C-alpha cells in the first residue's frame, strides 16, 4: 500500500476519540451513515473513496464484526465456516479514512440535522444515510418475542443466532422435528427461508435421516417455488412438509417453554422451532420519522426519503418499488445513492441511476439456482425492466456453474462493502 | 410406492345445510413426466398421480384425469354443495398402483 495524505489521516482517525474527529472534520461536508451492512458499508466506502477526502464520512455500526445474512444458510448447512461469513471494518477506516464508530444511533434530529448515539455523542450531518436493515414486528407470531430467541431462534440476523440454530439442528434427537415459521411478505431475502430449509435438509439427510421438516407459511406461494419443490423432491424426498396459506400455514402460535407449535388448530411437539417473524424497517428509520407504515418510502432517482431530501434510506428498510429486499439490491442502491450524495455535496457528475439484483440459492451441494432482474427509476418507483430465473430440469453442470457464480459474487460484494 | 407422498386437505369443519364450501387438496408427489432424461441420457420413467376423485357419502363430487404436464405437488381447489352432515373422501391414484386416501367429516349447524 502506498501512503498518501488521505490514507495517513484515515489510519490516524481510527486511533482518535470521536469528539476529536468531529473537530477535525469541520469545514468539509459531513455524511453520517447508520448501519454497516450491504447498503451502509457500500455507500460509506464509495462516498469516501470517490470524493478523495472532500467529504467527511462517519459510519455508525454497533457490531465490531459483521456476519452476512447472505451465505449464512450455507454456514447452517455446514458448507461455510462462521469465519468465512464474518467481516470487520478496519479497512474502511485505514483505506478511505472513514470514521467508524461502533455504537447505536438512538435519535435523529432532522431540524438541527444531527444523530445522537447511545454513548451520548451528537454527530452533525449535511446528509444522513440510513441503512439499518430490519427489525421484527412484535406479536406477529403469538407466543414469540425476542426474549425467547434462544429457545426458538430466528437466525435472520446472522452471527450468534446462526450458530445457535446450527447447534440445535445438530443436537436434534433421532427422528426429531425441525419446524420453521416462515414470514409474510415483504421481508428480507425472499428465497432465504427456503434455501435454509434446503440446507437443514442437507444436514439431516446425512446425520438424522428419519427426522422431519415442517414449514408453516402464511403465503400461498414463495420465491423460486417450482425450483425448490423440484429440488426437494429430487434430493430430500419425503423429508419436507410445506404447509402454505391454503392449508392453514398462516394460523400459527408457539409455546417456547413446552416446545409446541400449533398450526391451524393442531398442536405438535417440535425439537427445533425456527421462528422468522414479520418484519419492518430497522427502528432508527422509525425514530427518524421517515417511515410510512412498516417501511421508509424513497425516491427512485437517488434513494432520498420522500419525507426529507437530506435523508436517504437504503436496502431492506426502504420502500422503493419492485426490488426485493436483498444484499445485492442494497449494494446496487448504495452505489446510486453515493453518486447522488457526492454530486449534491461536491458538484461531481451525477449519472442516471441503474439498479440490478440477483438472488442465488443453494438447494443441495453444487445445485445452485438464481433469480434476478434489472430495474429503472420511474417517477413512481424503482420499476422492473426485465429478469431471468433458473429453470426446472437444468443439467448438473449448469447448476454447479450457478453456485460458483454465487461464490464469486460473495467475494465481490464483500470486497465492495469492506475493502 | 413412490417415496415422500403426503396428502393434505382443507375444508370447513362446520357449515349450514345447503351451503357451498371450498375444498383444497394437495398431494406431495414428484410428478415425473416421463419426458426427461437422466444424467446418462436415459429416459426417466413416468411416475405421476394420474387420477384424483372426491366423494361425499358415496356420491361423486369431482373426478379428474391428470396428465404429465401437471407440476410437482398437485394442488386442487374446488367447490361442493353440502346437503347435510357427512364425510368427504379423497382418493389419489398413482402410476405405480398405489392409492392414497384421506377423509374429512363435516357437520351442519342446526
Image: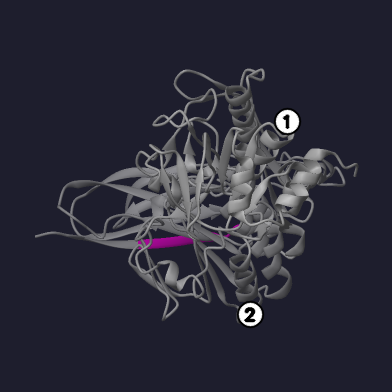
Q: Residue at x 32, y 56 (%)?
A: B58
Name the chain under label 2.
Answer: A
Res A171 label: 2
Q: Is residue A171 left or right of residue A308?
A: right
Q: Which residues are magenta?
A: B97-103
User: Of A270 and A332, which appears nearest the observer?
Assistant: A332
Residue closest to the far left: B110
Q: Is residue B102 above or below residue A399?
A: below
CB-based contact (under 8 Å), mark 2 and mark 1: no
Res A38 label: none
* A149 falls in the magenta region: no
Q: Residue at x 74, y 54 (%)?
A: A90
Q: Magenta: predominant secondary structure element?
A: strand
Residue closest to the far right: A2
| Quarter residue A388 falls in | top right
Q: Examine the rendering and report whether any part of residue B37 can be seen.
A: no
Q: Residue at x 72, y 57 (%)?
A: A15
The location of residue A164, given as percent across then percent down, is: 60, 72
User: Of A98 and B13, which appears nearest the observer?
Assistant: A98
Secondary structure type for disc 1: helix
Q: Is residue A217 above or below residue A382?
A: below
Name the chain under label 1.
Answer: A
Q: Is residue A136 left or right of residue A355?
A: left
What residue did someone put label 1 on? Answer: A50
Same-subunit check for callouts 2 and 1: yes
Distance of label 2 from label 1 (alpha carbons):
49 Å
Give the number of the mark in front: 2 or 1: 1
Quarter placement of the N terminus of chain A: top right
The location of residue A382, given as percent across then percent down, is: 52, 26
- How many marks the image carries: the answer is 2
Q: Earlier in the sequence, mark 2 or mark 1?
A: 1
Amino acid at each position: 500500500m502506498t501512503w498518501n495524505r488521505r490514507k495517513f489521516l484515515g489510519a490516524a482517525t481510527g486511533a482518535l476519540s470521536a469528539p476529536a474527529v468531529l473537530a477535525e472534520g469541520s469545514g468539509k461536508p459531513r455524511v453520517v451513515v447508520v448501519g454497516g451492512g450491504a447498503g451502509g458499508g457500500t455507500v460509506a466506502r464509495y462516498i469516501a473513496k470517490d470524493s478523495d477526502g472532500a467529504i467527511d464520512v462517519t459510519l455508525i455500526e454497533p457490531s465490531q464484526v459483521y456476519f452476512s445474512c447472505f451465505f449464512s444458510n450455507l454456514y447452517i448447512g455446514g458448507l461455510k465456516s462462521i469465519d468465512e461469513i464474518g467481516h470487520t471494518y478496519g479497512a474502511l477506516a485505514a483505506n478511505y479514512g472513514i470514521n467508524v464508530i461502533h455504537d447505536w444511533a438512538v435519535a435523529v434530529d432532522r431540524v438541527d440535522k444531527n444523530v445522537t448515539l447511545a454513548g451520548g455523542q451528537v454527530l452533525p450531518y449535511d446528509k444522513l444515510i440510513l441503512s439499518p436493515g430490519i427489525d421484527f414486528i412484535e406479536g406477529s407470531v403469538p407466543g414469540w418475542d425476542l426474549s425467547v430467541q434462544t429457545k426458538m431462534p430466528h437466525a435472520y440476523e446472522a452471527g450468534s443466532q446462526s450458530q445457535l440454530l446450527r447447534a440445535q439442528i445438530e443436537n436434534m434427537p433421532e427422528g426429531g422435528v425441525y419446524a420453521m415459521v416462515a414470514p409474510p411478505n415483504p421481508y428480507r431475502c425472499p428465497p432465504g427461508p427456503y434455501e435454509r430449509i434446503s440446507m437443514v435438509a442437507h444436514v439431516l439427510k446425512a446425520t438424522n435421516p428419519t427426522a422431519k421438516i415442517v414449514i408453516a407459511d402464511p403465503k400461498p406461494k414463495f420465491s423460486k417455488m417450482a425450483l425448490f419443490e423440484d429440488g426437494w423432491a429430487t434430493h430430500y424426498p419425503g423429508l419436507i412438509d410445506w404447509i402454505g396459506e391454503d392449508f392453514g400455514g398462516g394460523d400459527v402460535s408457539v409455546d417456547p417453554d413446552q416446545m409446541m407449535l400449533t398450526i391451524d388448530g393442531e398442536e405438535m411437539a417440535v425439537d427445533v422451532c425456527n421462528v422468522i417473524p414479520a418484519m419492518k424497517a430497522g427502528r432508527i428509520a422509525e425514530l427518524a420519522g421517515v417511515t410510512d407504515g412498516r417501511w421508509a418510502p424513497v425516491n427512485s432517482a437517488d434513494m432520498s426519503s420522500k419525507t426529507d431530501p437530506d435523508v436517504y434510506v437504503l436496502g431492506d428498510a426502504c420502500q422503493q418499488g419492485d426490488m426485493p429486499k436483498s444484499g445485492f439490491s442494497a449494494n446496487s442502491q448504495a452505489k446510486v445513492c453515493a453518486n447522488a450524495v457526492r454530486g449534491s455535496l461536491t458538484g461531481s457528475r451525477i449519472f442516471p441511476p441503474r439498479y440490478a439484483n440477483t438472488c442465488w440459492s443453494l438447494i443441495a451441494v453444487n445445485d445452485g439456482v438464481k433469480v434476478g432482474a434489472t430495474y429503472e427509476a420511474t417517477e413512481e418507483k424503482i420499476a422492473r425492466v426485465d429478469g431471468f430465473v433458473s429453470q426446472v430440469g437444468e443439467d448438473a453442470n449448469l447448476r454447479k456453474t450457478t453456485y460458483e457464480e454465487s461464490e464469486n459474487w460473495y467475494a465481490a460484494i464483500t470486497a465492495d462493502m469492506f475493502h | 410406492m413412490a417415496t415422500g407422498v403426503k396428502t393434505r386437505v382443507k375444508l370447513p369443519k362446520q357449515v349450514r345445510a345447503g351451503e357451498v364450501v371450498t375444498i383444497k387438496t394437495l398431494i406431495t408427489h414428484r410428478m415425473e413426466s416421463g419426458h426427461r432424461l437422466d444424467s446418462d441420457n436415459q429416459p426417466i420413467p413416468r411416475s405421476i398421480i394420474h387420477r384424483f376423485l372426491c366423494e361425499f357419502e358415496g356420491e361423486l363430487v369431482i373426478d379428474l384425469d391428470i396428465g404429465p404436464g401437471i407440476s410437482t405437488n398437485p394442488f386442487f381447489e374446488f367447490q361442493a354443495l353440502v346437503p347435510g352432515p357427512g364425510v368427504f373422501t379423497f382418493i389419489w391414484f398413482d402410476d405405480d398402483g398405489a392409492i392414497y386416501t384421506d377423509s374429512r367429516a363435516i357437520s351442519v349447524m342446526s
